[in-house]
Amino acid sequence: MEYIRKQFDTLKERILEPRKFMQVLAGPRQVGKSTLVDQVLAQVDIPHAVEVADAVDPRDSDWIHRVWEAARATMMFRGIGEYLLVIDEVQKIENWSEVVKREWDADTRSRVNLKVVLLGSSRLLLRKGLTESLAGRYELIRMPHWSLREMQDAFGVTLDEYIYFGGYPGPAHLIKDERRWRKYIKDSLVAPAIEKDVVMTSNIYKPALMKQLFELGCGYSAEILSLTKLMGQLQDAGNVTTLAGYLEILNQCALLTALQKYTNDDARKRGSIPKYQVYNNALLTAYKGRGFEADRTDTRAWGRWVESAVGAHLLSMAEELDYEVYYWREPSRKKDENDKDKEVDFIIVRDGEVTAIEVKSGRRGMNSGLPAFVEAFHPKRSFIVGTGGVSLEDFLGCEVETLIG
């Protein structure tokens, strides 16, 4: 039996409504967008066509017009008053949004009841045309990475397996064969995401550098490291501005981001040393993992995986719920080497309200970061996840909205 994600009901209901908006299903690769559409189509009676732009020449923008015309012709030949056109990977086509706008508006003027669903990879789709050309003509349904609860319900993974292998449904059955699982992540998931979703839809002048940056950044998930130091580990690294731009593109693809330090000064936020964070812990494991048993029994290493899993969970709904994720650190002013920096792992900000979250596991003992942050910034709430606080399973299994509501 196929697993049904919660976005299923939303898409089905909107398809069955009278034609008013295009529906846009957006999310990173291999989170189940195409599967979800297939599941919905199997339960609705509307005649439909599914077209995939993956193998189409990106310069052939007329392709969209041709499949649209084919849908109109089908309606005419069959004498039907309602039809559904699904276009997958639409962002691969140059100037796609202008063509879609023209065709949609033509149907609206002619009262052609042709409904449309567009599928695209992550926020690249939004940045490449939705907010400009198609403003007011679409509704967005976001598909995030799979949560702990979804992976447990669909595949029976344990908490530790989810923390280590992440939330990609495709290779879930491969986690007992770690070499095969790792090869799948790199070859069938990361390579297409970088080579197609990133390079083909963005101005990347150094694709090899982008790939190196991605792999190195994934390995540093949950760690703070300046771009200058990172440059020293990259070949032909260019400059800090180039790396920062590439990191933003990787963030747009829901692969890897660089969290900024929380401060009341926006300029200091932008100039802060970044904390790297993957959107899915599978990416940390693929590029840094030594093996499940080795990392699970290494207290320090496992602490990084736990913290990264918490960060990925927070990032998963940041765009949907309109909040920002930061970290906070205040360097020690004492010269005593035993006096550590004050640090809080994650700071969530929405509508001016702040939530501070400290992750506790075997990675490090209790520090004074959380009390110091509370005293300095007076957040709406603050709490510990892990040892001495909310259990990891409860936290990773909850809806993020409950944390910030």
Image (tube, rainbow, N blue to C red):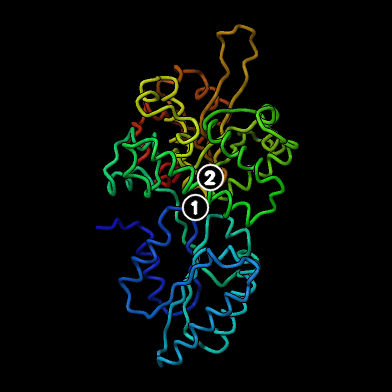
Q: In which quarter of the image is residue 226?
A: top right
Q: How far apart are marks 2 and 1 (CA)?
A: 8 Å
| Residue 308 or residue 294, whichever sits in front | 294
Q: What residue type is labelled 2?
A: Leu
Q: Is residue 251 left or right of residue 234?
A: left
- What amino acid type is highlighted by mark number 1? Pro
Q: How crowded is mark 1: few (under 14 residues within 10 Å), some or many (20 or more)?
A: many
Residue tagged 2: 255
Closer to the N terminus: mark 2 or mark 1? Answer: 1
**How many tags in the picture?**
2
- Nearer to the camera, 402 or 75: 75
Residue at point 58%, 63% (across, down)? 91
Residue 172: quadrant of the picture: top left
Q: Position of residue 313 (x, y in %)?
A: 44, 41
Residue to which mark 1 is pinned: 28
Q: How crowded is mark 2: few (under 14 residues within 10 Å), some or many (20 or more)?
A: many
SS of the residue at dot 2? loop
Instruction: Tell me: 60 left or right of 120.
Output: right
Circle on res. 227 = none
Residue 4 picture location, percent across and down: 31, 58
Residue 388 can be seen, yes or no? no
Query: Label 1 near label 2: C-beta < 8 Å?
Result: yes
